[in-house]
Image (spheres, rainbow, N blue to C red):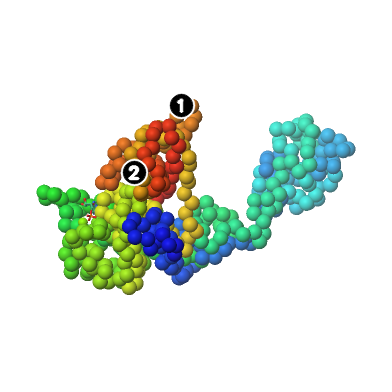
Amino acid sequence: MSDCCSAPGLLPFECALENMLSQITPVTQTLTLPISQALNYVLAQDITSPLNVPNHDNSAMDGYAFALESLNQSNTLTMVGRSMAGAPFQGECKLGECIRIMTGAKMPDCCDSVEMQENVQAEADSITFLKEKQFGSHVRKAGEDIKLGQQVLNQGHKLSAVDIGILASLGVSEVTVFRKLTVALIATGDELKLPGQSLDSGDIYESNSFVLRGMLEKLHIDVIDFGVIEDDFEAIKAAFVSADSQADAVISSGGVSVGDADYTKTVLDDLGEIDFWKVAMKPGKPFAFGKLPNSVFFGLPGNPVSAMVTFHQLAIIALTKMQNAEPLKRTNLQVKCVSDLKKSPGRMDFQRGVLSVNELGENVVESTGSQGSGILSSLARANCFIVLTAERGKVQAGEVVTVQLFDQFIH
Ligand code: AMP
Ligand code: MG
């Protein structure tokens, strides 16, 4: 761990991330699944190709296969048979001869080129070439997509729909993957009511666990939802003990601000080794991380935007490591900002922005407006974060800023 992590005061964002990752142990248990059930699982094996793709030289066109050398003698070749996809030509095709061939059909050994049917004049048993030909044209070579023995996918790769298709095209029927993670979600706060319940004076609807559940499901993680736990020591303790016994990670929102009057911090100090950080990021300063007896714990701030941003920027990175998946690649761009942005030096900002292309064809980003940490609709309207380093001050319209495009976990 670098020195910045033990310095007093605000904890730089990078240090929070580094500190958290150093305490994460990836899962080791694996299972073997049919490929049709393996979508979004993380591969626990490298996949090397058991064959050439395509498996044999084949035609890229509907037309005629022949040996180019034949055209040295005459522009007209005798047709001696046909090769269809799944029903290859069995005979011999000598110089001066050709065969009818369909797209995907196997090339006979004695042919090296294909002419498309539009470019010949066909009679009953001969064809005449209307255009000059080049060696090897319209032939897909065996192994031109994937070669026998080539590494196709690596351990740690999360299987997409296309990857499953590639496995199928290689004839691979099952794969060994890492098991899914389970995360327990806990919302704390006496003011929180579930949608469908009525609100008393001062109450609000609980929304964090709905956002988090959606993002966790997109991460391919099973969720156990503990709902809203009242601000009561015994209730909070019982929920955390139960969550810890069932899940790989426990995620709570609310009640982690330093000086907070509720019991979350007391319970956590009692149960595990938890650090309560003031991370130099905005939104999302209060953030807790540590170990419970059986799981890791992420304590997100209560404000909906803060909860979502700390989950997205910190917790997801740690959960990805825990899944044994390769690190996420996020897309950062440098673009012109067309709004003035408020910012004081000290914390790294993740402001919400809308990236678009202006009438000159340039990428530009505009602020979604008010950046209050309770304004969840600012996230719904945005398509990127405007990421401003801790040292940076306010931004004037026209300056260049870094934007991070929203990934599949947000939208
Ligand atoms: P806290 O960190 O518990 O002081 O909460 C900070 C703010 O976030 C308060 O306004 C809470 O009402 C709000 N809040 C806490 N938890 C949630 C939740 N699960 N859903 C929506 N708002 C919440
Ligand atoms: Mg609270």
Q: Nearer the viewer, residue 70 or 128?
A: 70
Secondary structure beneath label 2: loop
**In the image, which disc is placed on residue 344?**
2
Disc 1 designates what residue? 359
Q: Quadrant of the C terminus?
A: top left
Q: Residue at x 39, y 48 (%)?
A: 390
Q: Is residue 104 visible?
A: yes
Instruction: Indicate the quadrant where residue 61 lies.
Output: top right
Secondary structure beneath label 1: loop
Instruction: Indicate the quadrant where residue 355 lies.
Output: top left
The residue type indicated by label 1 comes to Glu
Residue 159: % across, % down: 49, 57
Q: Residue at x 34, y 66 (%)?
A: 290
* Label 2 or label 1, whichever comes before in sequence order: 2
Residue 85: % across, % down: 66, 48
Q: Residues within 10 Å of mark 2 (few under 14, many from 20)?
A: some
Q: Nearer the viewer, residue 208 or 148?
A: 208
Q: Is residue 44 above or below residue 65?
A: below
Asked if the beta carbon under badge 1 is closer than 8 A to the nearest atom of ligand 1, the reply is: no
Q: Residue at x 16, y 54 (%)?
A: 191
Q: Residues within 10 Å of mark 1 (few under 14, many from 20)?
A: few
Q: Is residue 382 above or below residue 34?
A: above
Q: Is residue 62 above or below residue 48?
A: above
Distance from the alpha carbon under mark 2 to that under mark 1: 32 Å
**In the image, which disc is placed on residue 152?**
none
The residue type indicated by label 2 comes to Ser
